[in-house]
Image (cartoon, rainbow, N blue to C red):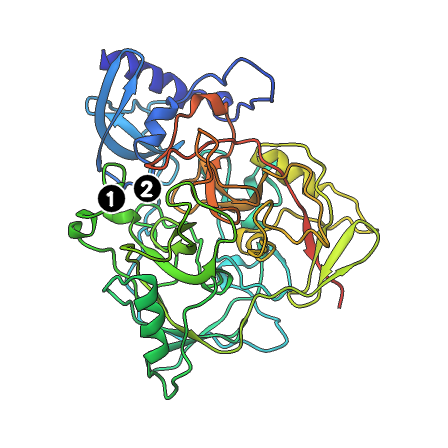
Amino acid sequence: MKAAWVGFIVIGLATASAAGAQFEPGDRRPPGGGPPPGAFEACERKQQESACSFQAPHGMVEGSCRHMREGMVCVPGDFHRGPAPGGRPPAQGRFQPREGDSRPPAEPAVIQVRPSGDFVDPGARGVTTVRNRVPDSGQTDCFSNRQRVACGDLQQRFKGQDGHYSARQGYRDNGDGTVTDRVTGLRWQQAHNAQRLTYRDAAEACSRLELGGQRAWRLPTITELFSISHWRNQGEGQYYIDRRFFDLEEPGPEILADDPFRSTHNTAMMGQTWSSTEYSGEILLGSATPHVFFFNFLDGRIKAAPKRGRSRLFYRCVSGEPWGDNLFQDNRDGSVTDAALELMWQQADDGQPRDWSQALGYCEGLNLAGYSDWRLPNIKELQTLADYRYSDPAIDPNFFRQQDRAGWFWSSTTHGENPAMASYICFGPCTSVEGEDVHGAGAQRSDPKTGNPSRWRARGGQRDETRIFNYARCVRDAEK
C-alpha cells in the first residue's frame, strides 16, 4: 500500500504547477498534487531523519522526515527520488538542504551600530532598507510557498516578503555575561538558565540577579522578549535566537516526563521562556487560573501558560528602560502613526481573508493616505501592534478597527525551519478546531501559506485550528 502513496508523492513533487496551486474561499476542490497534509504535519517541528508516521486513506504510512522541495515531509521508508529531467541528479540546494544550512558554532562578537540607524545586516545587501525602531527579524532569505528561492528570482506574487526588507539590528557582547541590544537599549542576560522554574520563582530569580555590575534585573514583557527572536532560516535544528550572542541549549528527554502533551511534543519544541505579560482573557485549559505569555525559542511561537501551579519554563532576565510601548496618533486619513516605534499603520483592515502570497500582494499594491510604499509587516513589527490589555481583539480599539474580531493576521515572515509555513498573530482568540481559546489573543503561530484548510486536521496537543486565509494590516515607515 505504501507504493501507491510513493507514486502520488513522485507525481506531486514533479508537478511545479501543483506546488503553486491556489485555493480560493468557497472552492470545494482541494489543490491537487504534492504530499498529503498528513505528511507535513507528521514532521512539523521535527529534525531531518526523525522517524514519522501518518494516517493515509490506504493505511498507516511510516518513514522518516526529509527535506524536500515542499519543505520537511514524512517520506515512506522505501521512497527514492528519481533523477531530474535529463537524467541528472537534483542540483544541490534545490531539493536538499544547502551546504552550510545548519548552524555552525560561533564565538560572540560585536556589531557596532551608529545611533543614526544607517546600518543593515550584511547578508541583506541589495534589499530595501527600512528605518523604524523595531529590531530586524534576521530573515534574509526569500521563499515561495514550498521552498527557498533567490530573492531576485521570485515570482511577482511573492514580492514584499520579509527577506526583501532590512531593518536596524545590532548587538554588543559586553564581555561580562550580558548583551546590549543597540536598537532597543535593553541589556540581556547572555547565559541560558537551564533549570526551568515556575513563574513566581523565575520572577524572583531575576529580581535577585546581580550581573554585569547591576541589580535591576526583571522578567521581560512578551514584546521585549520577542524583540530578540531571530528568524533566519537554518533548516532543521532551528533556534529562534541569535546564538552568536545568546546561549541556548535544547533540553534532554527528561523534560517530557511530566509534560501533559508529551504524546505530541519532542525536546526540539521545549524552549518555552517566561515573559511578565499576563493574558487579559481566559484560556480554555484552566480558565480560573491567570495565564502568562511565553516565547518558545526552539519552535518560534508565542503561547500562554498558567501563572500559578506546576508549569515550569525557562527564563532570561533583562534590564533597562521598558521598551515596546506604543505612542499612537490618529492621522484622520485612514492611517495611524506609532511615534515611539516610527511606524505608520493601516487603521482598518479591509475584512478580506487571503492566503499568504495574496496578503503580500495586497499590501504591496495598497495606496492609502497619499502613500504607495506599504508592505506586509514582518512578524516582529506585527507583534508590536498587539495590545495585551485587550483580548477581544488584542488591539487598541481607540485607534484601530478590526472587521472580524476573531481574525488572525499574516506577517511577511516565513516560519523558520519550514518554507511552507508563515507566521501570523492571533489578534482574535487563538483557537483549537473546536473554537476554544487555547493560547490567548495576542499569541503567535504559523499556518500553511496556501491550500485548502479542510485538508488539515487538528495540529498539536491543543488541537490548533488551521485557517490559511487570514487577514492583512499593512505598514510603512513613519515620516520623521
Q: Amino acid at mark 1?
A: Asn
Q: Image check: 319 left or right of 375?
A: left
Quadrant where the C terminus is found in the figure: bottom right
Q: What residue is at 42 percent from the left and 40 percent from the top?
A: 284
- The kind of residue on which mark 2 rests is Arg
Describe the element under mark 2 as helix, strand or loop.
loop
Q: Which residue is mark 2?
A: 45
Position above or below: 187 against 302: below
Quarter of image, res 349: top right
Q: Nearer the viewer, residue 51 or 468?
A: 468
The residue indicated by pointer 1 is 266
Q: Which mark is residue 69?
A: none
Placement of 365 over or under 346, stated as above or below: above
Rendering coords of residue 321 (x, y %): 53, 77
> Which residue is depicted at the point 36% across and 37% down?
462
Image height of 383 relative to 20, above or below:
below
* Residue 343 appearing in the image: yes
Q: Position of residue 393 (x, y in %)?
A: 60, 45
**Crowd tier of the residue under label 2, counting other residues whose Cα lies within 10 Å: few below 14, some 14–19, many 20 or above:** many
Q: Earlier in the sequence, mark 1 or mark 2?
A: 2
